[in-house]
Image (spheres, rainbow, N blue to C red):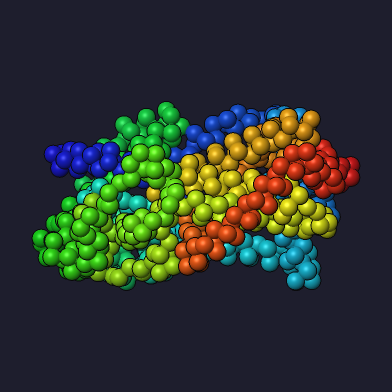
Amino acid sequence: MRERKRIKSQAKVCLKKHWAIFAAACLIAAFLGAEFSTSLGFSSVQSLGAAVPGSGFKTQVTENSWEGILATIAEHDLQAGRDAAAQAQQAAVDAAEEGDPAFGRTRGVLSELVNQISSGSIVVTAVAAAASITGSKNGGIALLVVLFAAGMAVYWFFVQNLFPVAMRRVFLEGMLYDRVTPQRFLFLLRVRRWRRAAWVMFVKYGAYLLWSLTVVGAVVKHYSYFLVPYIVAENPDLTARQAITLSRRMMRGHKWECFVFELTFLGWDLLDALTLGLFDVLFTNPYKVACFTRYYAQLRAEALQNDLPDARLLRDTYLYKKAPADAIAKKYSDVIRVMNTPDREPARLTGWRGFLADDFGILLFAREQERAAEAQRADEVRLHALMDDVEGTAYPVRLYPLPEEERQKLVESLNYMRRYSVWSLAAVFLSLSVFGWLWEVGLHLVSTGQLVNRGVLHGPWLPIYGTGAVLMLTVLYRLRRRPALSFFATILLCGVLEYGTSLVLELATGGTKWWDYSGYFLNLNGRICAEGLLVFGVGGLAVVYVLAPLLDEALARVNRKKMMAVCSVAAVVFLCDAVWSQFEPNTGRGVTDIEPPAPVSRSAAD
């Protein structure tokens, strides 16, 4: 009793410190179907009453589901399957048109993807492709089923089967260390033991399945194999026999204790049932795993103390105690050298120059002192994550018995926290404006076969792309150390920019539209849509963390005066075009001839 209270108390402290990543780990496991899948009951609460007899819901699901489409093809032919899919798609489109226009389903890649999946059209396409290979409809269906089964098997083996190990690695590191990053989910990939770990878990599940054929075996072996994911998370170099045998030995005499420990969570399980699994997701699941992680640590300590056979294979010492200073000094000499460099933090700029540099990452003049400071900053960014290892706030990856793969030199050399000079920002603006024009022109050429000068201006540039890139680099400068937050902030920033630009252009030109997303899935008044914003979000990460640093690095090797001259000439031409376009904007076919989205043909449905 006292031991359980101590373990739970320690687990609560750990959970409080790492709640976000622990809860995220369990939620991901639930979505992947690896563990805790029953915790997602709250997400389907609105559909609980939909399957009531007499509602017609069950019939609709049966006819329009993927299984229903396959049954239709098997009973009739591919054309019948296409007709059924078309009817399902038309019904969904009609419902979207009659409901909220923000959920349009008639235009865009995202709409097409949603329509293909929800209607079952993707199944018809797959069967048709398979039939063309096998030469018969039934052979096509059989091939599709085989491929689907193979895909599900691969998914189970490398995702559902393996994620519990990756998740427990995160929990194990969280016991002692204050900082656990999402990169630690990739631990098995970095030590290149993911296939071995997947095989161990596969053997464990196979053995348990065989024991489940007996009445007692299912219960006993559940606890005998209970520690296998924790053991593999600590040492993925073990064979399946070693991991399973070690778990059996460590659990000998502790099975009843573990069973009683599980029973102590029944109160939490009752609360979870009352909240349809919501409390499970937010607290109980991560709390349980944190508790049993502590329980594993206790059994591990007992096994080593009692010199249990093969217990010495659990050799990841620094999961349970901090590394000594001499070991850190030997493996992290380069990091320590950077940390101990005199004047590691150069004198900060003051006044408005300091405000621009510290809050927006802008350097007006790249002087010698500032260039040296930027080189020093590059080293700090490259070694930033490892500094936490040296300070003892994160797990020392270089001291792990199996060497982890180092990041590529190209990635290490990209100082994404760099500050940009005014000339570099001008080059980024012009380059991304030209790229945006090429992107828009290329998309229009592929979709319509027409080469059209897209945009308000007459030159080969779309300033909204360049403006967005510069704003990402400046306004969101303080978020660069947090890529996930930077991604969502980029979506928000680009959404405001695109919506505002659309509105201003319409007001300034008497209602003329340069783009209209009506009919796109998740659009807002036709001015922005989810599809475009997701592209901007991903593109924004590429700009901030890869493209802009590479461009700035290339400009640093170019003669400064020549670079300034080219940028000045290009900027003057751009400004002349912008002024001219205020009086004579670029209009015409393929630019401003925006038409309402055409309704989806009903021929198949009729």
Q: In which quarter of the image is residue 239?
A: bottom left
Q: Please tell me which residue is depicted at 49% across the width and 34% down the height of the picture.
A: 42
Image height of 178 relative to 194, above or below: above
- The reply, left or right, for residue 46 in relation to residue 164 is right
Percent position (x, y) of residue 495? 60, 38
Residue 204 against residue 515 in the figure, above or below: below
Percent x, y of residue 79: 84, 55
Q: Can residue 357 be seen in this view?
A: yes
Quarter occupied by the C terminus: top right
Q: Can residue 27 be seen in this view?
A: no
Residue placed most toward the observer, 388 or 85: 388
- Residue 107 image position (x, y, % from top left): 75, 44
Residue depicted at 66% across the width and 30% down the height: 53
**Front-lying residue, 73 or 44:** 44
User: What residue is rendered at 52% in x and 62% in y?
Assistant: 561
When asked about the image quadrant of residue 217, the answer is: bottom left
In this view, 295 is above or below 315? above
Q: Relative to the observer, which residue lies in front, 294 or 485?
A: 485
Q: Which of 260 and 303 is in front in this view?
A: 303
Q: How many labels does the image show?
A: 0
Q: Please name the residue shown 64% across and 55% down the image.
A: 570
Q: Position of residue 220 (x, y in %)?
A: 30, 54
Quadrant of residue 130 in the image? bottom right
| Quadrant showing the N terminus | top left
